[in-house]
Image (cartoon, helix red, strand yellow):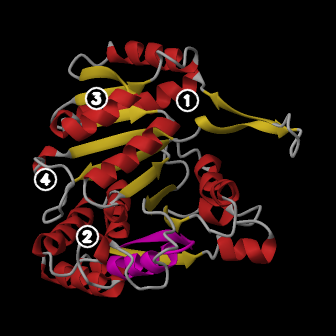
Amino acid sequence: MKTYKIASVPGDGIGKEVIPECEKVLNALSKKHPEVAFEFEHFDWGGDYYRKHGIMMPENGLEPLRSKDAILFGSAGDPKIPDHITLWGLRLKICQGFDQYANVRPTRILPGIETPLRNCKPGQLDWVIVRENSEGEYSGVGGRAHQGHPIEVASDMSIMTRVGVERVQRFAFKLAQSRPRKHLTVITKSNAQRHGMVMWDEVCAEITAQYPALTVEKMLVDAMTARMVMKPGSVDTVVATNLHADILSDLASALAGSLGIGATGNIDPSRKRPSMFEPIHGSAFDITGKGIANPLGSFWTASMMLEHLGEAPAAAQLMRAVEMVTRRGDVLTPDLGGKATTDQVTDAIINAIRGVNL
């Protein structure tokens, strides 16, 4: 039996509600797959920790995470703390500290979930968006001067390195090659951003020549938003910079039916450090404490984590259980048009796991 050491970081808002439910589901899955077990260590970092200590996580917080097989993360964000503090003090500190440079977000319409796309059927929307996760527009380089005066100035610099661009694009090219359609869309804005994005395009051209079996196309980010809505079946694998993919991936989840069901992995492809997996819904303080947070995103997240850990059968069974519940449609949270509570959805998933045969 393999016991995986998982760092559990619920964070803020509904992260504190869905991550414990995710642990319940993983433990139930372990009973179905006795060859796999989980040892969770909990970290109370986030907004409440900040109010006590003035920081979102300890200065040496990466050290206890370093020995883990993976990190299960809830959300970062608190309405009483500036967003740049919550994001940079916790989530980005882990992502950048462990060089999780590839953010991978799968998107598809789950059975029974209604999409806002009028004529799109579940099998027609099956995307993976790869986001550069370590530099670009979110490099954190910039500053402010003359604060509080009429001449105040602020700057944020987008930093792109050839090594950073090349490694995330190569990751995306390999991923696209592994998928049936072998189709990759590389997002750019080199018509207006005439330095970093031009290098991005040049690197893309160099790598494209090494993948003759792939269909590779380049598309401006603004045009891509329209294409995702108007022609979703024409999209498969996408790679984009930090900011561009941040926006496109949230649009993708909304088009699939709800931000509550989306999942993402912050991946260190070298596997020298643990990767971090999280649902994409954010802290959602407007529903925190009401017991109606959608936990399906955390379960999809757990499936991604299992896949990354090499436990493909367990990962597949968990997703089949999720699809069984969404297809049936009688136990869904309000964001999906249902009336179920968080724990009722969890119970339904656990019952589905117990009844699913491999």
- Image vertical order of residue 17 relative to residue 236, above or below: below
Q: Is residue 150 left or right of residue 34?
A: right
Specify which label sits upstream in the sequence, 4 or 3. 4
Amino acid carrying mark 3 in the image: Leu
The residue wearing badge 2 is 336
The residue wearing badge 1 is 164
Q: Is residue 69 visible?
A: yes
Depth-wise, is mark 1 or mark 2 nearer the camera?
2
Amino acid carrying mark 2 in the image: Leu
In terms of secondary structure, where does tag 3 sit?
strand
- The magenta region covers 1-26
Specify which label sits upstream in the sequence, 3 or 2. 3
Numbered badge on residue 122: 4
Q: Is residue 33 left or right of residue 219?
A: left
Say whether marks 3 and 1 touch (CB < 8 Å): no
Q: Position of residue 111 (x, y in %)?
A: 13, 63
Say whether marks 4 and 1 touch (CB < 8 Å): no
Depth-wise, is mark 4 or mark 2 nearer the camera?
2
Would you say residue 5 sits in the magenta stretch?
yes
